[in-house]
């Protein structure tokens, strides 16, 4: 386990300890454990740790295609997971689309203002006339009763069958190659966004940058392969791989950039 933990960052330690306690729980009770919704980085940590053990397996589900946030099931190898194990409910929000357009942050803000933990919500999908979101079954009824307005808009929330059409993700990753002098956060942002180091640093210190869904305000923060950055107003960047160094000792980098069609 020690050699595994050194691959993760120091501030990921509490989550790693949480995963280890889930692992013990499953081994002791010999029964499956369902987590809250986890982001891709957290799921990567779970699979890395649980993958060390022959006696345990993991599965995940978030209902939407390519759902970013998913619940995980950690279970003994004898167990056969079924869809109901993940305890997921999908809601549609009905609102007067003629007069107003709800956006992702509006919906997330309204859900959080109900006093519930972010771990109880999965993805939120939004298009011109429709909003759908996934929640954990244990809070579904509470959400249905209490989510009656988003901002000044009156809304009505209704659960839908999974057999009904779920919104697709209109996202596309485009691959790019770059050469960078280092893996520092400010260097990567200024290179990929073609902006000055000062501007990149201002974005970081202005708390507009997240790495793996965690806000990072240190300009010299070191990035690694697999990291996903989101820069407010500029979409997402994924560090896909480092491909060695150039003659001038610069790092060759493959990145993905996320553009939203909608």
Image: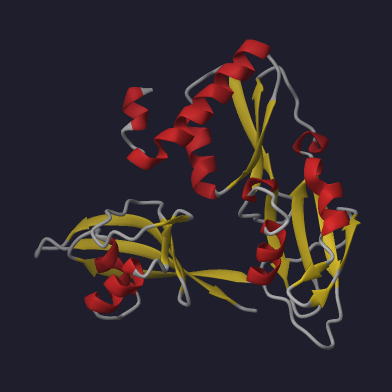
Question: Please, which residue is most extreme toward the top here?
Answer: 28
Q: Quadrant of the C terminus?
A: bottom right
- The residue at 37%/41% (across/down) is 11
Question: Please, which residue is most extreme toward the bottom here?
Answer: 99
Question: Please, which residue is most extreme toward the left here?
Answer: 248
Q: Quadrant of the N terminus?
A: top left
| Position of 233 relative to 143 (above/below) | below
- Left or right side of 138 for 68: left
Q: Position of residue 90 (x, y in %)?
A: 81, 54
Number of numbered discs present? 0
Q: Position of residue 44 (x, y in %)?
A: 50, 41
| Position of 208 relative to 220 (above/below) | below
Which is more toward the observer, 48 or 122?
A: 122
Q: Position of residue 56 (x, y in %)?
A: 59, 21
- The color scheme shown is secondary structure
Image quadrant in which you'd find residue 101:
bottom right
- The residue at 48%/55% (across/down) is 213
Which is more toward the observer, 233 or 73?
A: 233
Image quadrant in which you'd find residue 127:
bottom right
- The residue at 40%/54% (across/down) is 227
Image quadrant in which you'd find residue 94:
bottom right
Which is more toward the observer, 249 or 6?
A: 6
- Left or right side of 44 for 13: left
| Position of 161 relative to 178 (above/below) | above
- The residue at 68%/75% (across/down) is 103
């Amino acid at each position: 386990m020690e050699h595994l933990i050194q691959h993760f960052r120091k501030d990921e330690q509490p989550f790693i300890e949480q995963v280890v306690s889930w692992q013990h729980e499953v081994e002791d009770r010999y029964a499956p454990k369902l987590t809250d919704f986890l982001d891709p980085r957290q799921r990567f940590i779970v699979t890395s740790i649980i993958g060390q053990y022959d006696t345990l397996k993991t599965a995940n589900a978030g209902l939407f295609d390519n759902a970013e946030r998913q619940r995980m099931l950690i279970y003994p190898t004898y167990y056969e997971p079924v869809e109901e194990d993940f305890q997921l409910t999908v809601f549609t929000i009905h609102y007067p689309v003629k007069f107003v357009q709800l956006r992702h942050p509006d919906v997330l803000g309204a859900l959080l203002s109900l006093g519930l933990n972010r771990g109880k919500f999965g993805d939120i999908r939004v298009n011109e006339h429709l909003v759908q979101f996934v929640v954990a079954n244990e809070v579904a009824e509470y959400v249905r009763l209490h989510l009656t307005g988003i901002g000044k808009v009156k809304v009505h929330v209704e659960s839908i069958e999974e057999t009904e059409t779920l919104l697709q993700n209109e996202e596309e990753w485009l691959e790019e190659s770059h050469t960078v002098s280092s893996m520092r956060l400010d260097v990567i942002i200024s290179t990929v966004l073609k902006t000055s180091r000062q501007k990149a640093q201002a974005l970081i210190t202005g708390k507009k940058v997240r790495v793996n869904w965690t806000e990072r305000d240190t300009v010299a923060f070191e990035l690694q392969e697999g990291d996903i950055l989101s820069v407010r107003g500029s979409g997402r960047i994924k560090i896909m791989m480092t491909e060695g160094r150039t003659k001038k000792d610069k790092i060759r980098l493959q990145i993905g950039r996320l553009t939203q069609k909608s």
